[in-house]
Amino acid sequence: MEAELAPYHQIQDDRWRRYYECQDDSLVGGISWQVTSHTISQIQRKYHLWQEQEDNGGLLNEVITQTCLMDLEGNLLSDRILPTKYGQAFLISRNGGVEWVSVAKKKDTYLKKGFTLQNRVRVYSMSFSGRFTQKGNPVYSGIQIQSEEWSEWNSSDIIHSSHGNWIEFCHQNPL
């Protein structure tokens, strides 16, 4: 990794030198500085992902905790929390229509409405392809759910949503 990063570090060092020698005040923090910093960051991320994958026997592992809305019989109603005009809410399909169930802080609030919450913990395994998307997300292949456990949600738990979770997205929409 150091050999791959050396030219970029040299460029940044040269920019600093010229900046401190008052040759050009626009060198530090400008577009070219940001591009070089981004390139250094991507090389480091790629190296660390490859290293982690090698250390784990060829696969990366990720644990994702997600809060799910359930009915009182234990049936999953929704695992998506979406932002609304009035705060966050679960979106559920029920009785031929769509309903919003506001995210609440207390367990009793859900029970009064006929719902309960459960935490779903999934362990994913995947391989890093060595590439990133234009937005900088790593591209994974072979995403598999290794295990899934459920636990009762308590009012002291943080409410986790998979909405916006990159690994969940890639698992549901393979690239």
Image (cartoon, rainbow, N blue to C red):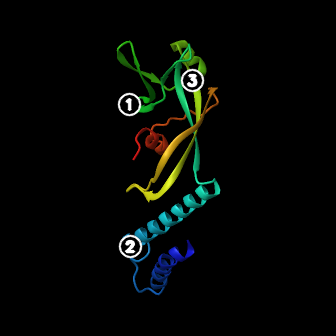
* Proximity of marks 3 and 2: CB atoms separated by less than 8 Å: no
Find residue 87 and report its horizontal and vertical position in percent.
44, 31
Label ID, residue 32:
2
Q: Which of labels 2 and 1 is toward the front?
A: 2
Distance CA(mark 1)–CA(mark 3): 22 Å
Say what amino acid the circle numbered 3 marks. Leu
* Residue at left offset 47%, top offset 87%: 21
At horizontal 60% and vertical 21% (from top left) the residue drawn is 107
The residue closer to the viewer here, 128 or 150, is 128
Give coordinates of residue 152: x percent, y percent.
63, 24
Looking at marks 3 and 2 on the same chain, the residue that comes earlier in the sequence is marked by 2
Give x and y (percent) for residue 1. 55, 71
| SS at badge 2 | helix
Q: As drawn, is 91 to the left or to the right of 106?
A: left
Left or right, 56 with respect to 104, comes to right
Q: Which residue is mark 3?
A: 117
